[in-house]
Image (cartoon, rainbow, N blue to C red):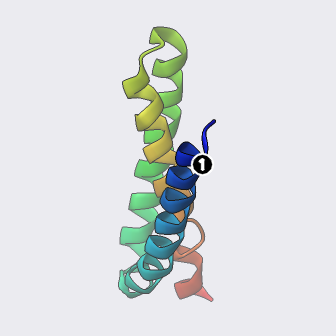
Amino acid sequence: MTIQGFIILAIIFIAILFAYSYADRVIKRLPAQTVKNINWVGFILAVAGGILWYFYKKPLFMFITLLGVIIYFLFYNYDKMEES
């Protein structure tokens, strides 16, 4: 990996962390049931994308799996904050 590739990856990582900190504020305002449903959609996307990626070896399914994992962990455990 070149230094330019490393810098691009570092900028993407920092941008994701920045977006995550602002998404936290928005997610806390959503109703608990909505957060729970979005969490399930992320889980289903990740599992279905992973299975399709395994069988068909297409890069599209890799990105679907990544998107599902990001959505799942972004909305993970926020629905339990309202109940306690």
Outermost residue toward the front in this view = 3
Query: Could you tell me which quadrant the N terminus lies in?
Result: top right
On screen, residue 13 above or below 81: above
On screen, residue 75 above or below 32: above
On screen, residue 76 above or below 52: below
Using the image as rendered, state which of residue 45 and residue 36 is in the foreground: 45
| Residue 82 placement, left or right of 59 | right
Residue 34 visible in this rendered orientation of the protein: yes
Using the image as rendered, state which of residue 18 and residue 67 is in the foreground: 18
Q: Position of residue 61 (x, y in %)?
A: 42, 26
Q: Position of residue 74 (x, y in %)?
A: 51, 64
Q: Position of residue 48 (x, y in %)?
A: 46, 30
Secondary structure category for the residue under label 1? helix
Dot 1 alpha-carbon crowd within 10 angstroms: few under 14, some 14 to 19, many 20 or more: few
What residue is shown with label 1?
A: 6
Tell me which residue sits at (53%, 28%) in the image.
Answer: 50
Tell me which residue sits at (54%, 70%) in the image.
Answer: 17
Residue 75 visible in this rendered orientation of the protein: no
Tell me which residue sits at (48%, 57%) in the image.
Answer: 12
- Number of marks in the image? 1
| Residue 44 placement, left or right of 13 | left
Outermost residue toward the top in this view = 56
What is the three-letter code of the residue carrying label 1?
Phe
Q: Quadrant of residue 13?
A: bottom right
Tell me which residue sits at (50%, 52%) in the image.
Answer: 8
Using the image as rendered, state which of residue 38 and residue 50 is in the foreground: 50
On screen, residue 76 above or below 23: above
Query: Could you tell me which quadrant the C terminus lies in?
Result: bottom right
Q: Position of residue 77 (x, y in %)?
A: 60, 71
